Image (cartoon, rainbow, N blue to C red):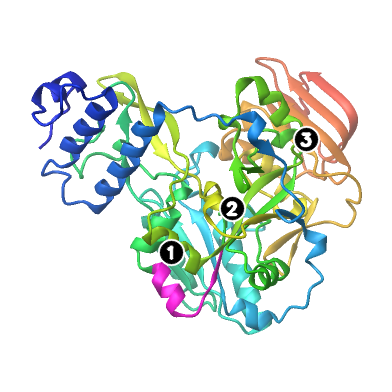
Amino acid sequence: MASLQTPVEMQRKSSIIDENATTSDLVIHQMYKYLNDEEFGQSKEMQSFYQLFKRYIETKAVKSEVTWEEIKSPTDKEVVEYDAIKDGQVDPHAVLSKLAVLKLNGGLGTSMGCVGPKSIIEVRDGNTFLDLSVKQIEYLNSKYNSNVPLLLMNSFNTNKDTQQIIKKYSNSNCKIRSFNQSKFPRVYKDSLLPVASSLNDQLDCWYPPGHGDLFEALYESGELDSLLDSGIEVLFVSNGDNLGATVDLSILQYMLSSNSEYIMELTDKTRADVKGGTLITKNGNVQLLEVAQVPKEHIDDFKNIRKFKYFNTNNLWINLKAMKKLITEHKLNMEIIPNVKSVIRGGHEISVLQLETAVGAAIRFFNNAHGVVVPRSRFLPVKTCSDLLLVKSNLFNLQNGCSLELTPERFFGGNPLIKLGSHFKKLKDFQSRIPHSPKIIELDHLTISGNVYLGKKVELKGTVIIVCSEGERIDIPNGSILENVVVTGSLQILEH
């Protein structure tokens, strides 16, 4: 079994590295030797990880920030308004025969204090994220007599539980297929050596390398060839927690008729989205610009919603033939994102790196790739319990038992801004403190901080701020109507 060694130890043992080798050469060589140990050498995933690691080390010394002067706003051909394409003639059965839907299902619900796949968290009327995804495809297939499949890209964290859960859909008209994304080793931030010492090492030694791994994972699983063999041309990809990401026939028809190989759905930025990646044109090519790539002196320019009006929803439409060609020609070298995490070893917290890629960054490799500016309703992610309060409320109706639609009564402005404090971070705490969703159709802004509980049939309007003092408790009584108020201190209502 391989043992952890320092870079110096690895350098001493190297007999083939030239004395003039750079530090980068030495680091790459030590990883090569490590992964070619008998504990790792037979793994295809380790070979893929080595190529990612090698590219990271080789490019790390290169300035990753963009040259601000090279950035140009996309033209009308590179970013198209949804209204310009939505009224085209569509033959639903014909276009749906060429479509498959993929949900990114590798995430856990840890950010909301849950154990297991995030997709199994209940979000609306007894339905989980996964339930709603399946029901959306079932409805589509029933309505148009189509056979659109649903693919789930799982991770080693979510696969086992997901396989058990999808058994209940065995008789559904939505055929579910799943595959796993890669399992890569975390590396110590200081030594740049793997945390794992063998393929069978404990789980915290490993990570799923971001949704940019979709391309290789889909190809290596055989699912890409299977889709192509069945006549499917387009893959609609979205995050599993985005409840607004339903199949849109207008976008599908437009993609097929425009011969675009890649379409990214964009939507209007708000103050809550100022860090979201945006499309730009650089050297004549469309590409995704992330905040991490922006020079510090231009961060405020990047966050200016008047200058960069749109951001990436991660709703993506990708041509499968073009995808396979780029994969087999090894041309999908997206920017590498070093994500710093930590592991506990010997009672100490040690920093580690996860080398990840993002599927949206691949847009620059595809021909005739561009963005479509879609309504905000197609971007409805649930990342926190604040988001969960929004989608569980009367602000949305569940149409056809599967799709959330904004109630017609909300005819003004965008969605309200909701900020719940640390007492509401975990799902179980959120459910105990707000067991009944308040009415929020006329709400603009809600902030709740501290030990606060909401009763039944509470209605919130305008701007509502509730701040409970440390060590105290605030109970909002049943049937309360709070409009443009600030509630502070403590307030306890005793039942009689």
**Residue at image point 35% right, 33% down:** 58
Q: Position of residue 180 (x, y in %)?
A: 37, 57
Residue 392 visible within the image: yes
Identity of the amino acid at label 2?
A: Glu
Query: In the picture provided, is 85 more to the left or to the right than 204?
Result: right
Which residue carries the number 1 mark? Answer: 325
> Residue 195 sits in which quadrant?
top left
- Could you tell which of marks 2 and 1 lies nearer the N-terminus? 2
> Residue 66 sits in which quadrant?
top right
Seen from the viewer's position, the closer of residues 332 and 458 is 332
Q: Secondary structure under badge 3?
A: loop
How far apart are labels 3 and 1 at the CA level?
Answer: 35 Å
- What is the crowding at mark 2: few (fewer than 14 residues within 10 Å), some, or many (at least 20)? some
Residue 373 visible within the image: no
Which residue carries the number 3 mark? Answer: 307
Q: Position of residue 459 (x, y in %)?
A: 85, 41
Residues in magenta, as a range: 223-235
Seen from the viewer's position, the closer of residues 146 and 477 is 146
Which residue carries the number 2 mark? Answer: 122
Identity of the amino acid at label 1?
A: Lys
Q: Position of residue 147 (x, y in %)?
A: 56, 80
Determine if the magenta segment contains residue 227: yes
Is 163 drawn above or below residue 72 in the view shown? Answer: below
**Residue at image point 16% right, 51% down:** 42
**Residue at image point 35% right, 64% down:** 221
Q: Position of residue 177 (x, y in %)?
A: 44, 69
